[in-house]
Amino acid sequence: MPRSVRLLVLCMLIASAGFAQEQEIRMSIYFGGGDYRVDTLQSMELHHWLDSIPNLEKYEIHLISHTDPIGGRQYNEWLSQMRSETVKQLILQKQIPENKISIKDWGLDNAVYSNRTRGGMRMNRRVDVILFPIVL
């Protein structure tokens, strides 16, 4: 490859690196069946994780709540809301403005893991905390 082409490719790579956007950052909080309380260990892990994010104020926080199917639709919609609200309250303890937090409660819909196994149901009982960079 001629030197001028290599130089042009190198310049394009350097220029495009300046436009690369940060990726989302995520963690999950898991719950026992029918429970919406966050245990002390997971609460501490969430606070430690939030403290470890540089420039946290430059992120939006999305809480995505899931349940297993035990208990029926109406119960799981309520449980999903309770779980996301509990996690939201933990995040607010870190002095993060409430308007930076959005919530989507899936309840038993849109399961990521199979609800045909106990392991899958256990993995579906969670709130995903997802940080998205704010693009100006």
Image (cartoon, helix red, strand yellow):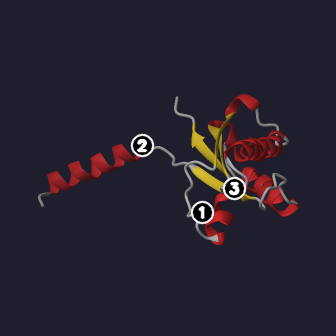
Q: Along the horizontal axis of the image, is 81 left or right of 130?
A: right
Q: Which mark is residue 18?
A: 2
**Of callouts 2 and 1, which one flags the residue occurring earlier in the amino acid sequence?**
2
Direction front: furthest residue: 72
Q: Are marks 2 and 1 in contact (CB under 8 Å)?
A: no
Residue at 16%, 57% in the rendered image: 3
In depth, the one of 49 and 109 nearer the eye is 109
Residue 84 occupies which quadrant of the picture? top right
**Of callouts 3 and 2, which one flags the residue occurring earlier in the amino acid sequence?**
2
Residue 30 occupies which quadrant of the picture? bottom right
Q: CA distance from mark 3 to mark 2?
A: 36 Å
Which label sits in the foreground, 3 or 2? 3
Which label sits in the foreground, 2 or 1? 1
Residue at 77%, 61% in the rendered image: 33
What residue did someone put label 1 on?
Answer: 115
What residue did someone put label 3 on?
Answer: 126
Amino acid type, callout 1:
Asn
Q: Secondary structure at mark 1?
A: loop
In depth, the one of 41 and 112 nearer the eye is 112
Q: CA distance from mark 1 to mark 3?
A: 13 Å
Crowding around mark 3 (Cα neighbors within 10 Å: few <14, some 14 to 19, many 20+) is: many
Q: CA distance from mark 2 to mark 1?
A: 43 Å
Which label sits in the foreground, 1 or 3? 1
Can you give x and y, in whole percent of width and height, for residue 118 in the image? 66, 70
Amino acid type, callout 2:
Gly
